[in-house]
Each structure stands twice: as structure tokens, then as C-alpha cells.
Amino acid sequence: MKTNRIAILAALKDETAGLKQRTRITERFLKGKILAGCLSGQEVFIVETGVGPVKAGNMTRYLLENFIVDWIISIGFAGGVKEYLNVGDLLVCDAAFWDNGETGFKEGKARTLARKDMDPARTSEAVGKISRSGMGFRKGGLLTVNRVIDSAEEKKWLGGIYPADAVEMETFSIAEEAEKKGVPVTAFRAISDAFNDSIVDVDKLTGADGEVSRWKAGLYAVSHPGDIPRLLAMRENSRKAAKVLAEAVLRVL
């Protein structure tokens, strides 16, 4: 099933780095936040939405109001909330869940979640292509929240109480905006931290755009030398997850 233009959306530069290297870029919009080009013989947009549900929703709305898009593939990193998901595993999303970005963890009580299903035909097509390529993956749900879940304790709680396999910050908002325009969405997430991994508070490492700031990361490492092994592991895990995302998209196009 070929489309005229596929939009590949991710929050961070790192999440699309492998795809950009393989794309013949022909045009740039919004200071490079939206790239148009050709990838594996397919006309694509590669879009950096920014981190979080608000930025992701706003960028998706802008994209669909200003460009012709036939299919959105939402990609990115996610934290596993189930024991069977390991760093580098690929999750093909069948639904995204949301309740104003909250989790209920602090209150110790589950919240009533809204649900957005990913497009069944496109997702089935993607699953078929990935399966035939021999690449491993799992299907499951995503919980979209408005902050990074950095503690293993909270991830384990989320996995035990919600019908989600991983947690992230953009998919529900992207699907919500796409639904308004009748554009199908498929979502892939690569696990960058497993459910028993507690990671460094990324707010201490990132700038206002959500991207890792070398200056802030270096300052944090100097002032928290005991966390250097975790910082190095996070960097390596992100690279591994980015490679998985690129491989998944290339198999689907």
C-alpha cells in the first residue's frame, strides 16, 4: 500500500537521526523542524515535534493544516512498564491511553483513561512487513503522560494497573489531532529504559526544547559523579533504541 506522503513524527533529534542520514532532503520548514525528502523511494516528511503532549499536538496540527499527509508514523523512545520489555525492544502500538497526562501514582489510585486506537489497517500492514523481515517486536498499548517517568517504582505500578506496556509523552496527542483530519496513525516505540530501571531526572540534563544539553549534562556529571554510570547507560540505551526505530521504519516503507 503506497501513499503520496508519509510523515514520520518524533519528539527528539536523536529519535530520527538514523532516518535523516538515509533521507535525500529536498526542503526544510520551520527552521528544520520539518524536513521533506525521499526515503527508500518514498516521499516523506521527518518532523521534530518537541517533547510532551502539548508540543506534539501543536506540531501535528500545524503539519496537517499546511501539508498534504496520507499517513503518520509516530516514533520515539519509551519506558517499559512490563517485565517482558527490555531495552532495545520494539513495541508496535495498538492504542494510546491518556487522562490529562496524569498517572494517579501519587494518589495510589487508577484514573479513568481515554483511549485512541491506532489505525488497524496501517498497523496490520506494518506488522506484516516487520514480521516478514524477521525483526522482533511486540504489540501493546502506550500510556501518554506529561512528564518523564524516571522511577522504577512508578513504572512497575503503572504496568500493574493500566492496560499499557510502555509510557511516553506524545502518541495520544498526535493521534487526537490526526483523527480530526482523518489521517491514519501508526506508532512505534523503542524501549530506552526497562521497567526496573530508575533513570536520572532528565529535566536536569535538558534544555527548554527537551534536547539533552551538553553543558547541563556535563555540569550534572561533575556534581553527581556517582551517577556517571547511569548517564553513560542512558546514552547507550538511547542510541540502541534509535537504531531500532530506524530499522522498523525502513522495513515498513
Image (cartoon, rainbow, N blue to C red):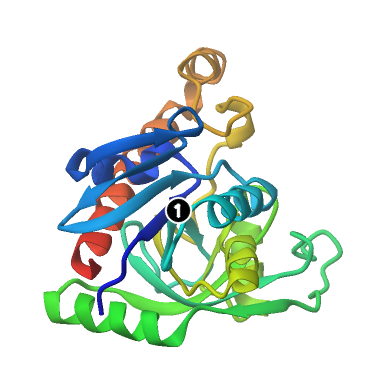
Q: Label 1, on which residue?
A: 9
Which quarter of the figure is the N terminus placed in? bottom left
- Give the answer, above or below, for where 102 lies relative to 45: below
Residue at x-position 24% and y-position 69%: 252
Q: Position of residue 101 (x, y in %)?
A: 74, 59
| Residue 193 showing in the rendered view | no
- Give the answer, above or below, for where 208 lies relative to 76: above
| Residue 242 showing in the rendered view | yes
Depth order, front residue of 186/6: 6
Q: How many marks?
A: 1
Q: Secondary structure at mark 1?
A: strand
Q: Quadrant of residue 21?
A: top left
**Structural crowding at the residue carrying mark 1, measured as other residues with C-alpha within 10 Å and reported as few (<14), some (14–19) or many (≥20):** many
Q: Position of residue 124 (x, y in %)?
A: 34, 86
Residue at x-position 46% and y-position 79%: 140
Q: Quadrant of residue 90?
A: bottom left
Position of 49 with respect to 98 (left or right) is: left
Position of 179 with respect to 46 (left or right) is: right
Depth order, front residue of 183/164: 183
Residue at x-position 30% and y-position 39%: 17
Position of 227 with respect to 152 (left or right) is: left
